[in-house]
Image (cartoon, rainbow, N blue to C red):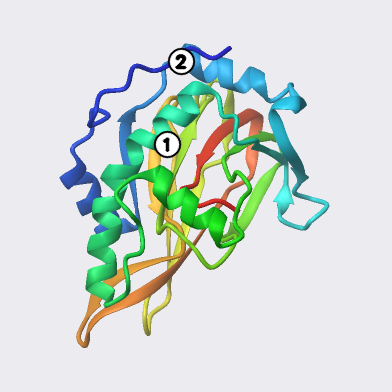
Amino acid sequence: MVTTAGLPADLGADWGAVQAELDEAGCARTPRLLTAGQCRELIALYDKPELFRSTVDMARHRFGSGQYRYFTHDLPAPVRELRAALYPHLLVIARDWASRLGRPAPWPDTLGEWLEMCHRAGQGKSAQILLRYRAGDWNALHRDLFGDLVFPLQVVVGLDEYGTDYTGGEFLLVEQRPRAQSRGTCTILDQGHGLVFTTRDRPVRGARGWSASPVRHGVSTVRSGHRHTLGLVFHDA
């Protein structure tokens, strides 16, 4: 059993600063969300396949190299609580982005209502991910899109200690700006800390107003050790 986090309502984050960083770079760090002990407990769950609905070998599907597992809907308490606590803060940003782009904002006030919408639309599978990389593994640039209903932000939480448990394996974000070359961002995930990032695209202001800038994410090659992360997605598959 993984101990619960006892999370504060604001998760200790300055959400105005988080949005400003997202607007600037397409990703933004959070304060610590999980203790080192909780990170180790979540890592240990990887070797309990009964907790997961499926396992994906990335090399087999040409996604890169490494492995990840999708949790069932019976989520460990810290995963469930963290996802629910993050949603209202990310919802404010999602609605603001939709307004800038002149898009509908279909996301209701609560995560439960939103997931019910996903399920009614045929997206009924849990999309929460525990990922495991070893030396030589990497993840190709991609987007976590599983159907027509998409939440525009997601979060990855580092579970191992960079520089001690592994080297390499930086989080990569590549953005194609309108009428410009692609821009890359490289981020080290600190243990227990989250990184909020763009699921599909984000608003960028240009001479003609706001436009959507497509974004993909991935992981650079792990040079040594092992790297585990928790992926929190706010739409189901």
Q: Position of residue 155 (x, y in %)?
A: 43, 43
Horizontal side, residue 150 vs residue 33: left or right: right
Horizontal side, residue 199 vs residue 26: left or right: right
Q: Position of residue 106 (x, y in %)?
A: 36, 64
Horizontal side, residue 53 vs residue 100: left or right: right
Nearest to N terminus: mark 1 or mark 2? 2
Q: Nearer the viewer, residue 3 or 106?
A: 106
Q: Regarding mark 1 in the picture, which secondary structure is present there?
A: helix
Q: Mark number for residue 8?
A: none
Above or below, 61 against 210 in this view is above
Which quarter of the image is occupied by the C terminus? bottom right
Corner quadrant of residue 18:
top left
Q: Mark number for residue 36?
A: 2
The disc labelled 1 sits on which kind of residue? Arg
The disc labelled 2 sits on which kind of residue? Ala
Which quarter of the image is occupied by the N terminus? top right
Q: Regarding mark 2 in the picture, which secondary structure is present there?
A: helix
Residue holding disc 1: 83
Which residue appears farthest toward the bottom when viewing the image? 208
Q: Position of residue 219 (x, y in %)?
A: 57, 48
Residue 176 seen: no
Residue 97 seen: yes
Above or below, 142 against 48 in this view is below
Above or below, 36 against 115 in this view is above
Q: Nearer the viewer, residue 166 or 101?
A: 101
